Amino acid sequence: MEFIAFVLAVAGLCAFAASKDAKIKIGGLLAMLIFGSLWVCTSFAIVIPPGYAGVVFNRMEGVQKNVLPPGFQLIIPFLQVVYPHDVRTQSMTFDGEEAVSSDQQVVHTNLTVNYHPRQSELGALYQEVGFDYPQKIVQPVVREALKAEIAKQAVDQLLANREQVSQAIRAYVAKKLSERHIDMELISLTNLRFSPEYQAAVEAKQVALQQAEAKRNELIKARVEADITRTQADAEAYKISATNKALGSSPEYIKLEAIRKLNPNAEIIYVPHGSSILIPGVTAGASQNGGKH
């Protein structure tokens, strides 16, 4: 733009100086003033947009350390060239990134990283790498961190340790990018996926665990039932033992049991002295025919 304005300003000056026609001279003068002013404005000043910073390249000294902040900035024409660059948050997404676990299982995951170049070090970043640092620095560092941390974990522990893995990746990436004039803001590790063969094995394992749990519950139930049966048997044995002991110490116990069988609802029985317990009113040892001789 500034070169075109300079050429048009020179052309207007030539027309003003060479032509004898008054109209051409006036047109040349106007062209020289307009395009000359435009050339001066574009050559001696530059406007850095918000969210950007300007890397200054000096044709004699190379990339300068000072970085121009947003706003109106004065420069030396022809000697300095300014390259504005976005210093706001940038995002990079990895879809289905592949890594291998410690037990040689293939793992796929989605990963998002947010970062931005340091404004004060933008000149050094441009000089060392250029403005294509996302492909040259960020992408390789993130992939290296992901593969290294996944390789430390067994595949069956990845889901449980996902936060630990994410923190380790964050720490590694933040350190490596910081060394290259880039600040990492966040890393998000999502959607861990495994190979179809491993998924099938996991499902089979879950089924086996469920079946084993059902068997264990059945065994516990059988043991409880056996304990109940054993307790009942012990109670019955104790009852029989107590009954035998009572029979051995008191023969009258048989008569008492007979009365209970004949009249289960009886609570109190009055037996006159000398009467039979089995047949009330009959004297012990007497005949049931009323004392016939």
Image (tube, grey):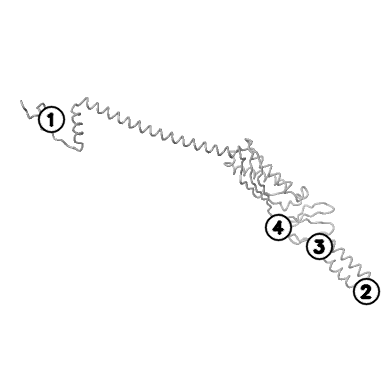
CB atoms of marks 2 and 4 within 8 Å:
no
CB atoms of marks 2 and 1 within 8 Å:
no
Give the residue at mark 1: 276
Determine the secondary structure under disc 3.
helix
Q: Which mark is residue 21?
A: 2
Q: Is residue 177 left or right of residue 215?
A: right
Comparing 37 with 159, the one in front is 159
Give the residue at mark 3: 42
Disc 2 to disc 1, how far (Cα)? 167 Å
Disc 3 to disc 1, how far (Cα)? 140 Å
Give the residue type that dot 3 points to.
Thr
Disc 2 to disc 3, how far (Cα)? 31 Å
Q: Quadrant of residue 196?
A: top right
Give the residue at mark 4: 51
Q: Which of the marked residues, 3 or 1, is nearer the chain's N terminus?
A: 3
Image location (x, y in percent) of residue 33? 85, 69
Q: Quadrant of residue 250?
A: top left
Which residue is located at x 24 percent, y 28 percent?
243
Which residue is located at x 38 percent, y 34 percent?
225
Determine the secondary structure under disc 1.
loop
